[in-house]
Image (cartoon, grey):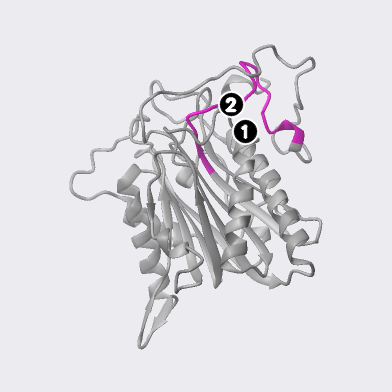
Amino acid sequence: MRNLLTDVPGLTVGHATDLVLGSGATVVLCDPPAVAAVDVRGGSPGTRETDLLDPSASVAHVDGIVLSGGSAFGLDAASGAMAWLAAQGRGYKVRSVRVPIVPSAILFDLLNGGQKDWGTEPPYRALGLAAAHAASRDFALGSVGAGTGATTARVKGGLGSASARSPSGHMVGALVAVNAVGCPLLGRGPHFRAAPFERHAEFGGLGLPVPLAADAGAIHVKGSEPRMATTLAVVATDAMLTGGQARHFAVMAQDGLAMSLFPVHTPLDGDCVFALATERVPLAHPLPDLLGIGATAALVLARAVARAIYEATTLPYAGAQPAWRDVFAPR
C-alpha cells in the first residue's frame, strides 16, 4: 500500500512541473482502459471530452485522464497525453487506427506569479506529453503537476492522494489538485477540516482543536471572480462497475470535497471528479458494495485534499501564497 491512487491496479500517474511557469500537468493512465464517469459541480468548470462519459455514450472505456493548470490553455495537455498513448499503440480501435480517449479538466493558475508570457506557443501540450512519459506507480505530492500553481483561501494548494479498502474489500484511491475558492482549514488555526478521517498522521496528526475554535465555521474565500478556482479529482476502484455505477461512484466521492473544504461547489468553482473502475473484482452484492465503495471514496478524497495542503511548498516568487508548512509547521 502506497497510500496513493496507484494502489488501484492498472493505474499509473505522471507529473510534469515547470516552476518557472508556475504550472504543470498530471496524467492518470489506464492499462487496460477503464470504465469512466464524471461529476461536475460549481459554476465555472473547464473540461474536455466529458460528454463522452455519459453512461449512454458509445465508448465505454478511457485510456487516461488529464488534470492541468493553465485555465483553458491547459486543455492542450490532453493532446500531449494522447500523442504519447498513440505512439504506444494504445487507444480506441477504429479499423486500422487507434484514437486514445483522454478526458481532461483544468484549473486556473494564471495569476500566481509564474512566467506566463508564452506568446503563440502555450506549453501545455508538451507538459501533457512529458507527464504521460513519466507515469509510474510512485509519484510525488504537493506543489507538483496540476497542483504546482494551485492556491486556496488561506494557504497554498497542491496535489494530494490517498487510498483505502472499502468494507467489501475493494481497493479505492483518490488523486486531487486543490485550487479551491474555499479553505481546507478550521478558522485561522492549523487544523485541517479533514482531521477526523486522517490515518497514520498522514497530514501531521494534529487532530481537531479542543475546544473547537470559535471561528471554525467562518467563511474564508480567496476571491470573488469567476473561473479562478477549481478542485479537480480522480477517484478509482478495482471493482467491476457499469457506466451508471461509475457515475454514482463519482457523485458520492464529491462528498469528500465537502468534508475537507468550505465553502465548496460555489459559482466561482469548477469542481470536477472523474471516476475510474479498472474491473478487476466483481461486486458480490451490487447495491451495498457500491454504497461502501462510494462512501470510502468520499473519505479517501477528503484525506487526499488535506495531504495536498500538507505536502505543498511555497513557490519561489515574491508575494507567492505561503504553504501550510511555512506558516504552521514546527521549526
Element under label 2?
Answer: helix
Res 197 quadrant in image? top right
Quadrant where the image shows the N terminus: bottom right
From what the image shows, is residue 329 above or below residue 307?
A: above
Work out whether residue 147 or residue 100 is closer to the camera in this orientation and state it. 100
- The residue that appears at 52% across and 33% down in the rendered structure is 157
SS majority, magenta: loop
Q: Position of residue 208 (x, y in %)?
A: 75, 24
Label 1, label 2: how far apart the Cα atoms are: 6 Å
Residue 59 left/right relative to 328: left
Work out whether residue 90 or residue 329 is closer to the camera in this orientation and state it. 90
Residue 274 left/right relative to 76: right
Disc 1 residue crowd, few under 14, some 14–19, many 20+, Cα 10 Å = many
Res 258 quadrant in image? top right
Residue 228 makes an appearance in the image: yes
Q: Position of residue 228 (x, y in %)?
A: 38, 33
Q: Position of residue 8 (x, y in %)?
A: 66, 62
Element under label 1?
Answer: helix
**Residue denoted by label 1:** 310
**Residue denoted by label 2:** 324
Which amino acid does the dot numbered 2 rest on? Trp
Residue 194 part of the magenta-drawn span: yes
Disc 2 residue crowd, few under 14, some 14–19, many 20+, Cα 10 Å = many
Residue 148 part of the magenta-drawn span: no
Which amino acid does the dot numbered 1 rest on? Tyr
Work out whether residue 232 or residue 113 is closer to the camera in this orientation and state it. 232
Q: Position of residue 37 (x, y in %)?
A: 53, 60
Q: Which residues are magenta?
A: 177-196
Quadrant where the image shows the C terminus: top right
Please report contact status of discs 1 and 2: CB closer than 8 Å, yes or no. yes
From what the image shows, is residue 124 above or below residue 136?
A: above
